Amino acid sequence: MAKDDTPTRDATLCVHPPEVSQEGYASLAVPTYRASTIVYPDGEAFLRRATRGADGYTYGLHGTPTTRTLEEQITRLHGGARTLIVPSGQAAISMVMLAVLKPGDHVLIPDNAYPPVRALCADYLNPRGIAHTVYDPMIGAGIADLIEARTRLLWIEAPGSGSMEVPDVPALIAAARARGVLTGCDNTWATPLLFKPLAHGADIVCEALTKYVGGHSDLLLGSITVADIALHRELRATLGTLGIGVSPDECALALRGIQTMAVRLAHVGQVAEDFARRLVGRPGVAAVLHPALPSHPGHAAYSRDFKGGSGVFSLVLEPGQEAHLGAALGALKVFAIGASWGGTHSLVAPQDIASIRTATRWPHAGPLLRLSIGLEDPAELWDDLAGLLDRLSAG
Ligand SMILES: *Cc1c(COP(=O)(O)O)cnc(C)c1O
């Protein structure tokens, strides 16, 4: 069987895996292609490798068929032009800002942004000559008054992290577009299954795939999907220059997770909304922050623009329960205490929203608990939650 050019020396055999037949092999799984080096058929092809462009394979850092499959799947779900996969959700946001903002530019971020975004602007971009203004997420078309000649990007998060207000995304985008300002939206909560920002005119949508796409609390990835191919080239160049790429093994986990996302999301969305409605008016609960509730800030925009809710919402406890909170949370049986939501396990995380607000006054006095509903038995989850509230109101 050995052809003339088949190596025969042991050390070379160790380096060259044999080619085996793939005849008849068909699998439903996306193969995990790993590579740093990409090899070329001849010297000419190697010398011309730059002509392969932003979509071509030239180096493992810039993608393999596994990462491209995940990119393309997310692109299709969002109806975008291209997607880039980066090491985390926060990296997705920071890469967008690093790629599009230059010294002298200005970015608008909402008061309910994922907190590290505020830190990115204040602690990293500001000292490098990029200014920011924090806006009231419910400002709507009034955002026009905050757009300056130097404003390059309007950042949106819908709904806000933990605080859950739903901004009027189409109004924000319309005001930005009228002034030639790029718009980007953090869509982690909704996923493209429940909200598609590009369809509302956004230029960029970022997601923490860490959450619902991964779905099992065991990976970190982020996505940047753009509506315009020129923006893709700009972002791809920035990632390459900064040396940002992802492991195809993480992408393979995400490709597995995304297959069940629609079913998981439908389930947790329904349980979360049911719990939210049942928690309204319960002793010890001052407010339930779920956009499906008519009293919720942005309920009208949510009903108009979103297909439904995911599994994350918050509740505000009556003031005075802070002292018992630690012990009461420690006695939970099914809910785990932790921040990075979207997995199969239900989570609870206390948050202090008032202390991070700068553009708006947080209207609630009591402590806030952010809940992420997972896939456990809903009745058992409800008993756990009810037990927590009973312990808290008993003191
Ligand atoms: C978790 C999260 C992020 C960051 O994602 P990581 O993968 O943890 O960096 C960004 N935005 C929102 C809304 C998130 O919930």
Image (tube, grey):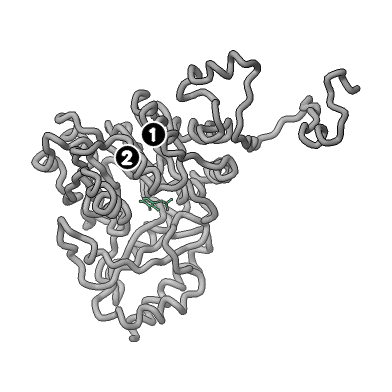
Image quarter hosting the C terminus:
bottom left
Using the numbered discs, state the Cα–Cα distance from disc 2 to disc 1 in whole angstroms.
8 Å
Q: Would you call the spot at circle 2 few (<14 residues within 10 Å), some (14-19), or many (20 or more)?
A: some
Quick check: 156 left or right of 55? left
Q: Name the one closer to the observer, 130 or 136.
A: 130
Q: Residue at x 80, y 26 (%)?
A: 21
Q: Residue at x 84, y 26 (%)?
A: 7
**Element marked by disc 1:** helix
2 or 1: tag closer to the N-terminus = 2
Considering every residue shown, the one lying at the far top of the view is: 44
- In the image, residue 4 sits, relative to residue 392, either above or below, namely above
Image quarter hosting the N terminus:
top right
Q: What label does residue 98 carry, if any?
A: 2
Q: Name the one closer to the observer, 174 or 110.
A: 110
Which amino acid lies under the numbered mark 1 shown in the image of this protein? Thr
Q: Would you call the spot at circle 1 few (<14 residues within 10 Å), some (14-19), or many (20 or more)?
A: some
Q: Could you tell me if the residues under marks 2 and 1 are in contact, i.e. CB atoms within 8 Å?
A: yes
Q: Which residue is mark 1?
A: 238
Horizontal and vertical percent for residue 267? Answer: 47, 52
Q: Is residue 160 visible?
A: no
- In the image, residue 212 sits, relative to residue 230, either above or below, namely below
Quick check: 162 left or right of 47? left
Which amino acid lies under the numbered mark 2 shown in the image of this protein? Leu
- In the image, residue 296 sits, relative to residue 151, either above or below, namely below
Q: What label does residue 197 carry, if any?
A: none
Q: Quadrant of residue 348?
A: bottom left
Q: Residue at x 72, y 30 (%)?
A: 26
**Element marked by disc 2:** helix
- In the image, residue 125 sits, relative to residue 6, either above or below, namely below
Horizontal and vertical percent for residue 48? Answer: 53, 16
Q: Quadrant of residue 187?
A: top left
